[in-house]
């Protein structure tokens, strides 16, 4: 039997991981990268335990653990005073199996490239259009010719043309209000404690890497597109008077080593992570602010899940497989995007009162709420690659929206965890009508008709006890989140009192 064929668009971290995983799953893969070489954009990278676990799915985790420095990220003020001094590396490792590690970005690219068989990567090959197929195979036009594929994985980054083609009505990424610099510098003499320092609308991160170089990043609130003639001089202007070792690290840097990008994120989640035979992956699917250090980790999770699904599916069932992919990934990544946005927003605070409040809360949290940090990240760091059987079950247990038939409320959204129980009603104009006293968020997508679709309660709180077990506290949303049910699209459907 002919092997199933996949085309991967883009050979960043997400595309390389997908190519490695699909090859290992027995697919015939062509990975098209428009650049002439596979080069990392960005200096260093923090990999959380979930990212490492995803890398293990491609056999690439241990190569990186060998090069790793454990992240112990304390928070400082611009004058150097510590707000929190982290010693959580060991605690994170004890709880999640690995600490957060910091590695050169090039090492991640090298580890993944080593898992991609020769002949798979087609460099200097730009994909110019994709016909997503469905029952028929997908067709991919490239500058090197036409390709047919049972599956297309679009890992073409934040500016994904494939995303725009699949979802032309979606608003796409928006500027997050911050610009980011990254550089590798050092080694320098003197102590270089790992820390992130917060100023007024500004952040400077210092992460020593194995062997002496230091990965630094900085962010500042700025108008989109703002650029300086000399970005190193701009960093010195903004951060040169901050505490040591920041001035020393900047003095050791060369202007050519400084990268600057505006940060963008997806304002509203996509309705789905697939269309026809095309799956969106990584920043193409869920661009996010970098403040949680999860963009690449989530891309790796996407690739791990897709590869697991691809290992047990034949080409005829690609569309079923992609349904399951969306079901497994959309709700989780939407949550991470939202969380990243919240942290990013906090770093842009610049009024003295807001900054003093933020710093005090951070200081107090460091002293009074030890362990809270770990609990907060548990659902992100604790991710495990699902077993294929579980992925199937999740899709089958999706929350369904069924036609109610009434003209006023044609759609009733029902929870699969509690079959038949109406959580909220979706009116014809898509404005949700909440049950009295209920607050929370439902997300909904139509399945190609006005009468059917899927929804998930992302959060449901308070309210009249339709059912006490569901309404008290947050029991229901947690159950739904854990099950990884699909939160597919958002019709502005915050259901509020
Ligand atoms: C300042 C900053 C710090 C960050 N720090 C972290 C961190 O510590 N930890 C973490 O997990 N994440 C971090 N991230 C996020 C992370 O860098 C990204 O989420 C991740 O690199 C996305 O990978 P990707 O493969 O999806 O996209 P990309 O890396 O953007 O790759 C897309 C590729 O597709 C190619 N391409 C595009 N269009 C076409 C086409 N038509 N044909 C062929 N090829 C095409 C591009 O050339 C590119 O190589 C950070 C991001 C920023 C901005």
Image: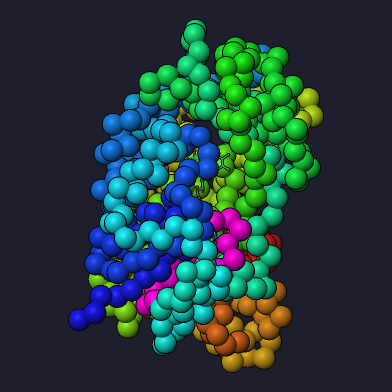
Q: Nearer the viewer, residue 207 or 50?
A: 207
Point out the residue furthest to the top here: 190
Colour mapping used in the image:
rainbow
Q: Residue at x 46, y 82 (%)?
A: 133
The residue stretch that appears in magenta:
149-162
Q: Position of residue 493 (x, y in %)?
A: 65, 67
Residue at (39% x, 76% y) in the render: 149
Q: Quadrant of the C terminus?
A: bottom right
Residue 260 location, quadrant: top right
State which quadrant residue 202 falls in: top right
Percent position (x, y) of residue 355? 72, 27
Query: Does 403 appear above or below 277?
Result: below
Residue in front for this viewpoint, 361 or 278:
278
> Is residue 150 on the magenta stretch?
yes
In the rendered image, the quadrant that contains the N terminus is bottom left
Left or right for 36, reference 210? right
In the image, farthest residue toward the left: 1
- Residue 488 visible in rendering: no
Q: Is residue 254 magenta?
A: no
Number of residue marks: 0
Query: Which image quadrant for residue 27?
Result: bottom left
Q: Is residue 228 above or below residue 380?
A: above
Residue 187 appears at what percent x and percent y? 47, 16
Residue at 65% x, 62% y is 172
| Left or right: 409 in relation to 46 | right
Q: Position of residue 140 (x, y in %)?
A: 48, 75
The residue lying at 48 percent from left, 52 percent from top is 36
Judging depth in this view, the residue of 184 and 496 nearest the camera is 184
Residue 178 in sight in this render: yes
Say if 26 sits above or below 366 in the image. below
């Amino acid at each position: 039997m002919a092997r199933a064929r996949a085309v991967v668009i883009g050979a960043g971290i997400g595309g390389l991981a997908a190519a490695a995983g699909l090859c290992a799953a027995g697919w015939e893969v062509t990975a098209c990268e428009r650049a002439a070489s596979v080069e990392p954009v960005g200096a260093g990278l923090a990999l959380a335990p979930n990212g490492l676990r995803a890398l293990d799915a491609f056999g690439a985790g241990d190569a990186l653990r060998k090069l790793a420095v454990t992240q112990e990220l304390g928070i400082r003020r611009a004058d150097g005073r510590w707000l929190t001094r982290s010693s959580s590396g060991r605690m994170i490792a004890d709880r999640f199996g690995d600490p957060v590690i910091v590695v050169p970005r090039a090492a991640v690219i090298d580890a993944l490239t080593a898992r991609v068989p020769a002949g798979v990567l087609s460099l200097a090959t730009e994909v110019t259009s994709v016909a997503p197929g469905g029952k028929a195979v997908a067709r991919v036009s490239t500058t090197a010719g036409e390709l047919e594929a049972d599956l297309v994985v679009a890992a073409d980054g934040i500016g994904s043309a494939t995303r725009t083609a699949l979802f032309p009505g979606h608003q796409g990424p928006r500027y997050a209000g911050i610009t980011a610099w990254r550089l590798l510098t050092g080694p320098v003499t003197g102590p270089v404690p790992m820390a992130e320092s917060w100023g007024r609308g500004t952040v400077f991160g210092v992460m020593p890497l194995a062997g002496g170089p230091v990965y630094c990043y900085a962010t500042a609130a700025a108008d989109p597109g703002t650029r300086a003639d000399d970005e190193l001089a701009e960093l010195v202007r903004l951060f040169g008077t901050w505490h040591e070792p920041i001035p020393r690290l900047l003095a050791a840097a060369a202007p050519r080593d400084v990268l600057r990008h505006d940060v963008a994120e997806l304002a509203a989640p996509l309705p789905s992570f697939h269309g026809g035979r095309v799956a969106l992956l990584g920043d193409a699917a869920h661009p996010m602010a970098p403040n949680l250090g999860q963009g690449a980790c989530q891309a790796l999770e996407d690739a791990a899940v897709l590869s697991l699904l691809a290992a047990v599916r034949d080409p005829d069932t690609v569309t079923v497989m992609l349904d399951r992919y969306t079901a497994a990934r959309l709700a989780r990544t939407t949550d991470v995007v939202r969380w990243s946005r919240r942290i990013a927003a906090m770093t842009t605070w610049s009024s003295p009162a807001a900054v003093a409040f933020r710093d005090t809360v951070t200081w107090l949290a460091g002293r009074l709420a030890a362990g809270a940090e770990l609990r907060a990240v548990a659902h992100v760091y604790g991710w495990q690659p699902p077993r294929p059987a579980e992925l199937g079950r999740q899709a089958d247990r999706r929350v369904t929206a069924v036609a109610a038939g009434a003209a006023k409320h044609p759609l009733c959204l029902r929870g699969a965890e509690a079959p038949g129980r109406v959580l909220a009603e979706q009116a014809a104009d898509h404005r949700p009508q909440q049950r009295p006293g209920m607050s929370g968020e439902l997300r909904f997508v139509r399945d190609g008709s006005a009468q059917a679709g899927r929804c998930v309660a992302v959060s449901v709180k308070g309210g009249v006890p339709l059912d006490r077990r569901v309404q008290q506290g947050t029991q229901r949303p947690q159950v739904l989140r854990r099950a990884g049910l699909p939160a597919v699209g958002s019709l502005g459907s915050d259901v509020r009192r």
